[in-house]
Image (cartoon, rainbow, N blue to C red):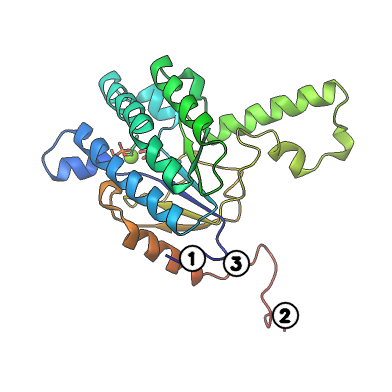
Amino acid sequence: MDVTGLRHIAIIMDGNGRWARARGLARARGHRAGVDSVRDIVTDCASAKLEWLTLFALSTENYRRRPRTEIRTLMALLRRFMIAERATFMKNGVRLRTVGRVDELPPKVVKEIRATEELTAGNDGTVLSLALNYGGRREILDAARRLAAAAQSGEVDLDDLSEDDLSRRLDDPLMPDVDLLVRTAGEMRISNFLLWQVSYGEIHVTPTCWPDFRRANLEAAVDDYRRRSRRFGGLLAGEER
Ligand code: IPE
Ligand code: IPE
Ligand code: MG
């Protein structure tokens, strides 16, 4: 997979439930199958030397609104994934980071996430950023709150604010802007994901449900991205007249 010129791919991993339903299986089976896609896609991105991959694994809304049994399944899968993937992350140079209110997840899960973050912190390959109990508006609100506190203490001057002053206060100040946003399972919406960072990101929606999503699907998304002309509000060479 050739990812030259692409720094950050973000994926809304949707459709686990529909994948399971189409096969007459329980939703939990869809989530379990989805973990295999995560493992494969992370490995592919690491070998392609992609700089940053963000995966939307759980929204604040999912955490609040899904049935407790489904949340319990997701938490168990997450914890197991954290433990099982450590060796592979180390072998492939993957660095795990997170965005979202991770500390509100069950302590047993948080412990394994933090341990994996610490273990992989020194790796210099692909950053795997997991969005967990994440909400885009909540992230921006928190950043605004931190900015207001900094203004109050005189650390920043409100008359002289830049976008950087806010983005440095987001959940992960190191996260680059999204180049390519992929959504599986066909919905044409952002669902409160990376609202700030996706500003000029190219959007690719595929009908494929997440448990069926593999390297060939990601390559198709990257090919689609390459056919886009990114203008960032300007014009392309030759468009001036
Ligand atoms: C995405 O699959 C995974 C999470 C949101 C945790 P869904 O569970 O949303 O699957 P559908 O949308 O019901 O098919
Ligand atoms: C978005 O999917 C969240 C994740 C993939 C983690 P949802 O399934 O929650 O999105 P909606 O509810 O269809 O917008
Ligand atoms: Mg869904």
Q: Position of residue 144 (x, y in %)?
A: 70, 30
Secondary structure beneath dot 3 equals: loop
Q: Position of residue 61 (x, y in %)?
A: 43, 28
Task: Give the residue at x 23% y 43%.
Answer: 18
Q: Give whichever of discs 3 and 2 has the lower sequence position.
A: 3
Q: Nearer the viewer, residue 10 or 46?
A: 46
What residue is shown with label 2?
Answer: 240
Disc 3 packing (10 Å; few <14; some 14–19; many ≥20): some
Q: Amino acid at mark 2?
A: Glu
Circle on res. 225: 1
Disc 1 packing (10 Å; few <14; some 14–19; many ≥20): many
Residue 148 relative to residue 25: left or right: right
Verify CB contact (< 8 Å) between mark 1 and mark 2: no
Q: Nearer the viewer, residue 157 or 97?
A: 97
Q: Amino acid at mark 1?
A: Tyr
Q: Position of residue 193 (x, y in %)?
A: 50, 41
Q: Position of residue 158 (x, y in %)?
A: 85, 33
Q: Is residue 170 above or below residue 180?
A: above
Q: Quadrant of ligand 1?
A: top left
Q: Give whichever of discs 1 and 2 has the lower sequence position.
A: 1
Measured in 3D between alpha carbons, the distance from the residue under mark 3 to the one under mark 1, in whole angstroms, is: 9 Å
Task: Give the residue at x 12% y 44%.
Answer: 23
Secondary structure beneath dot 2 equals: loop
Task: Give the residue at x 77% y 25%.
Answer: 148
Measured in 3D between alpha carbons, the distance from the residue under mark 1 to the one under mark 2, in whole angstroms, is: 23 Å
What residue is shown with label 3?
Answer: 230
